[in-house]
Image (tube, rainbow, N blue to C red):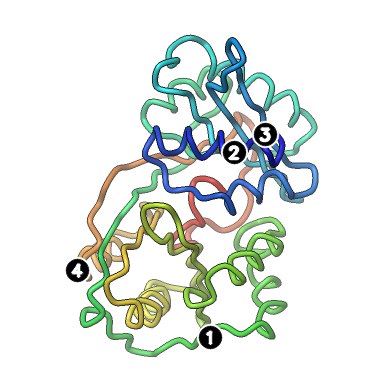
Amino acid sequence: MALDDIPTGLRLCRLSGWNQVADDWRVFLESPASGGFLAERAGRAVGTTTFLRYDAFAWIAMMLVDPEERRSGIGSQLMEHTLAALKTAPCVGLDATATGELLYSHFGFVKDYALVRTTASIDAARFRPEAPARRMERADLPSVFRRDRDVFGADRSVLLESLFARSSECAWISDGGYCFGRPGHLYHQLGPIVADDRRAARDLVASCCAGLDGRRFVIDAPQFDREWLAWLASVGFVEERPFVRMFRRHDRHPGEPARQYAITGPEFA
């Protein structure tokens, strides 16, 4: 894929009801050693896949096939090309829907843990932080990047800096953690949310959402902490669908997943 192919990627996103916008595609196509593949049939684009290389692992995303061309082997061909491009990566992961999980298992991926997508139209009156966080400033970014390296398991400073630039109103920080967000086609995505405990995670979300009344948000949360998920439900987030995080068999996943109360999204891990 090239930057000129972004409109094609967006067309396939809209056909599948996905949330990504052009800035999301640019991350894959402009990041070092990252990229994507475009499948064509008779000169017509019918599928995509992308990959993003962090220093410690690689991430596969944006597996999209035109609805009229599904179950014709296009997804498998895209995976073959992507895995060939990532054959030297020390670890490879992806997030999968129930349908995608079957495909990826054929390529040696195994389930690591479950996640759930939750959505809400923000009612600011429901968000009352016990210990308010503060808006992140650019001067905070170096210390956030250092903290994030251990939790995420890789350096994603370029991604986080781009999220800060795109949506600084969703970037909050406290002694107990930090969060970022970004706009999308259907809703804003709030994530990553990284915190020492669920109380710090609640205060980050509440501080952010208290000033964003009426916006529609999605939070993709690992299903480690039932009380965290119950709190999200109590402030209006409704479970939309489950999905799973998978890694190539025998790969050791990096980082500390239990401290990521929300991922950045299936696109970026």
Q: CA distance from mark 2 to mark 3?
A: 15 Å
Q: What kind of element bears circle 2?
A: strand
Q: Are marks 2 and 3 in contact (CB under 8 Å)?
A: no
Which residue is painted at 45% across and 56% down in the image? 184
In this rendering, the answer to whether 233 lies above or below 73 is below
Residue 172 drawn at (x, y percent): 50, 79
- N-terminal-most mark, 3 or 1: 3
- Quadrant in which the N terminus is drawn: top right
Query: Which is more foreground, mark 2 or mark 3?
Result: 3
Between marks 1 and 4 in the image, the one whose residue lies nearer the viewer: 4
Residue under label 4:
234
Q: Is residue 22 above or below residue 96?
A: below
Tally of numbered discs? 4
Q: Amino acid at mark 3?
A: Gly
Q: Residues within 10 Å of mark 4 (few under 14, many from 20)?
A: few
Determine which residue is flagged by label 1.
Answer: 175
- Kindly report the distance in space between the C-alpha atoms of the residues bearing marks 1 and 4: 24 Å
List the residue tagged with mark 3.
36
Q: Which comes before the other along the chain, label 2 or label 1?
A: 2
Separation of marks 4 and 2 at Cα, in angstroms: 32 Å
Q: Position of residue 214 (x, y in %)?
A: 27, 72
> Marks 4/3: CA distance?
39 Å
Q: Is residue 109 left or right of residue 90?
A: left
Q: Quadrant of residue 202?
A: bottom left
